[in-house]
Image (cartoon, rainbow, N blue to C red):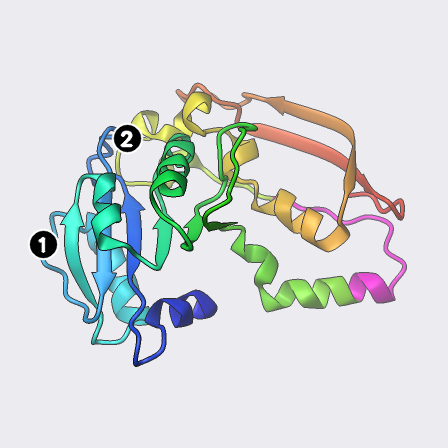
Amino acid sequence: ITEAVSLIKGPKDKPIKLALLRVNEEGKKEKINVRLVRDTFKVPNNDFIYEGDLKRQLEFFFPEDLEIENISKNIQDLDKFDPDVIIDCTPTHQHLKNCNYIEKSLKNKCILVEKPIFVKNEQFSSENNTYFCAYNLRFHPFIEIIKENISQNNIEKIIFNCLSYLPNWRKKDYTESYSSNAETGGGVALELSHEIDLALSIFGSLQIKKCIYKKQSDLDIQANDFLFLDLETKNKIKC
């Protein structure tokens, strides 16, 4: 986060322009709010800033001289704003469409896409811009300590465990969330994929020995909510 904020702040003699892509607070997936940020920070309309969390986060991380310059419901406004950095926080099923538009319309931009990058394997060529996926946990300092301990000790097995309860994730009805439908990017394999990325970042390539992926709870969702992976590293460490 610190590195991202430093990039967004930019050098004092050249402010960095940031565009933040989000759906509106009602979750109407056909509309995209493009938040155009530069110079100084003020919140022009709390109706557009969902639940106030964004305001508090920006006030904590950004200096007082940062402002939301404009709010648009049309992604085509990216063309005239011409941002340096774009952060795509829209639902997963919108990422491919957004990336294709950005790739066609803009050049030499830095785009951070919220994880997972797409709902499924897609053909996407990034020739004009640089894209990153927000698997940020791999950069936590504690992960470096884990890597060092693994390299210095004879470890036979490591367990990654993640438990979460979808109805507690958001204020709106969980059944109306894109997270409740596999076609829009829902399901534990995508939504809780940080642990898979952590395993890959620590061990490199992994071989799948066993996989159980199914819907196990009584939640009213159209997506799998249980994933068990039995993995093995090239050094025969169980994961």
Residue 20 sits above or below residue 166 on the image: below
Q: Quadrant of the N terminus?
A: bottom left
Q: Within the magenta stretch, is there residue 157?
A: yes
In the image, taking residue 203 as reference, residue 103 lies left or right, namely left
Residue 171: x and y in percent read 27, 40
- Report, in whole angstroms, how far the alpha carbon at label 1 lies from the one at label 2: 24 Å
Residue position for label 1: 45
Q: Quadrant of the C terminus?
A: top right
Of the residues tagged 1 and 2, which is closer to the observer?
1
Tag 2: amino acid: Asp
**Magenta part of the chain:** 149-161
For marks 1 and 2, the one nearer the N-term is 1
Residue 2: x and y in percent read 44, 70
Tag 1: amino acid: Asn
Q: How many marks?
A: 2
- How crowded pointer 2 is (Cα within 10 Å; few <14, some 14-19, many 20+) is rated as few
Residue 173: x and y in percent read 28, 30
Q: Tell me if residue 91 can be seen.
A: no
Residue drawn where x is 74% and y is 62% of the image: 147
Q: Tell me if residue 196 can be seen.
A: yes
Quarter assignment of residue 54: bottom left
Residue position for label 2: 173
In the image, taking residue 27 as reference, residue 145 lies left or right, namely right
Quarter assignment of residue 85: bottom left
Residue 166 sits above or below residue 162 on the image: above
